[in-house]
Structures are given as C-alpha cells and as structure tokens.
Image: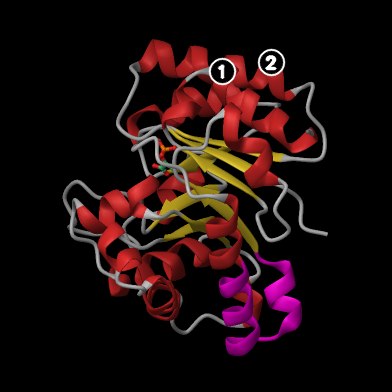
Amino acid sequence: MRRPFIAGNWKMNLDRASAIALAEGVVREAGKCEGVDLAVCPPSVYLECVGKALARSSVGLGAQNVYHQKDGAFTGEISAAMLKDLGCRYVILGHSERRHVLGETDEEVNKKVLAALAAGLTPLVCVGELLTEREQGKTDEVIRRQFDRSLAGLTAEQLVQLVIAYEPVWAIGSGKVATPAQAQEVHLDLRRLMEQRYNKEVAQTVRIQYGGSVKPENAADLLALPDVDGALVGGASLKVDQFMGIVAGLKE
Ligand code: PEP
C-alpha cells in the first residue's frame, strides 16, 4: 500500500521567526498523526532554522528547487549535496511557478531530478496543464510530455524513489480546485503511463500527490480517491490549523 504523503510548499513567504513558529506548530500536531508522511518546504534561506525546529520529529524537510551541477561557478545556485547537508529529505522540482514564471524547461527539470536522486534526495516532481490546454482537450498530452521529458532516462529503481505531484496550473493559488473526477482521471492516466513506460509494480508503487487549492474543506474528497496518495499544499500550508486540517481529511 502507498503511504499518504502531505507536503507544504511555503513558497517565498514568511520570515525567520514565523517560519520557525510554523514548523514548531506542525511538529506539535504531527505527533498526534499516524500513517502519513509529512514534510514542509520553506524558502532556502530558512532551511537550516526550520530543520532545527523539525529535529527529532517525523516531519521531513524539503527544498523548493536545486541546481543540477555538483559545484562550481554558478552564482546564486544551490546544489543537491548542499541541501542534503542541511538535512533535506525532499526537493520540489518542476513546480508550475518555476516552469511558467521563471521559464524552467522539462530538460532542466530532468537534470535536476537526476542530480537530486544522485544526492539521495526524494524529488517531488510537479506536472500540470494550463487552463487553455485543458480547454483544448490537451491535458493528457501535456502531462505525458512533461512526464516523459522531465523523467527521461530514469530507471525503474529511480522512478520508485520519487513522488509525482499533479498540479493543474489553473488550480494553483486560484481557489479553483480540480473536481475529484478531474483529479482521479489524471492520476489514473499517470499510473497507466508508468505501466506503459515501466511496469505494473512501478505504476502501483509511485506516490502521486494532488496539488491546487487544497483546503481542509475539500481535502477529504480528494484524499479519498484511489489514485491520490496525498497532497502538495501551497497557501493552506502557511497556517498550522489549515495544514493539519488537510491532514485530518485522510481520516474522514
Ligand atoms: C502549490 O503551489 O504547489 C500549490 C498547490 O498551491 P495552492 O495550494 O496555494 O494552490
């Protein structure tokens, strides 16, 4: 069985004190939760202090990006080994804001995925269609292209080490959540794709999170879907009660 996994993407929010307070709040509440993996992904400058706040808890630390090179003259970039050194277990890759605001390509995401895996990090690889692409009936095509290109060259052993996050771009930060039917359709299609490209075991092993305006009010319906294995949460991960309210949706 796939263990549910709920991760908070704090994006470029909070300051040092509020990041530590949020992490401490999540740790306090996480002690009451069983049967779920939890992680928070603060801005990179707060990874170290948030990591300290998470110490000795089961809540994992994740970064929001990485650079694919090991080291060298890459001003402003951070390597996978550096993230590992700071205690990171996860790294979000190919988030739609990086793809669509910062121009990151599937090929760049692919290099980052390989670098993260080589350093022993678990990549949370995001895929998702724009509203225009959905309206043109191109959702499957876009998701399949992002999967094939962002994960090019990965062996089955590597694929089962990562997590995929289906995040329809139109649902991110917009308050417009995908319907359970829309989410399940894409998650199932991703599983079929993994079976075609790899095998049934891989398809049944890889966890697929849903992301896009997940809130305590809609979490239970999404998390109950057979092919949804958790959530990647943006806005609602910035408040302890909302984030933990989403986690509580697993039990409903
Ligand atoms: C995200 O950025 O990954 C996300 C899902 O954001 P939100 O929950 O705010 O839509």
Secondary element type, mark 1: helix
Q: Is mark 1 within 8 Å of ligand 1?
A: no
- Which secondary structure is most common in the magenta stretch? helix
Q: Nearer the viewer, mark 2 or mark 1?
A: 1
| Amino acid type, label 1 | Val
Residue at (33, 30) in percent of width and height = 45
> Which residue is located at x 70 percent, y 18 percent?
29
Ligand 1 image-quadrant field:
top left
Horizontally, residue 241 falls left or right of residue 168, namely right
Compute the Cα span from label 2 to label 1: 10 Å
Magenta stretch in the rendered image: 188-206
Q: Can I make out residue 205 in this image?
A: yes
Measured as percent of width and height from the top left, residue 190 is found at 56, 72
* Towards the viewer: 226 or 179: 179
Residue 240 - label: 1
SS at mark 2 in the image: helix
Decide whether residue 189 is among the magenta residues. yes
Q: Provide residue 133's location: percent of width, then percent of height.
A: 30, 67
Q: Nearer the viewer, residue 184 or 193?
A: 184
Residue 101 appears at what percent x and percent y?
Answer: 19, 51
Q: Amino acid at mark 2?
A: Arg
Which residue matches tag 2? 28
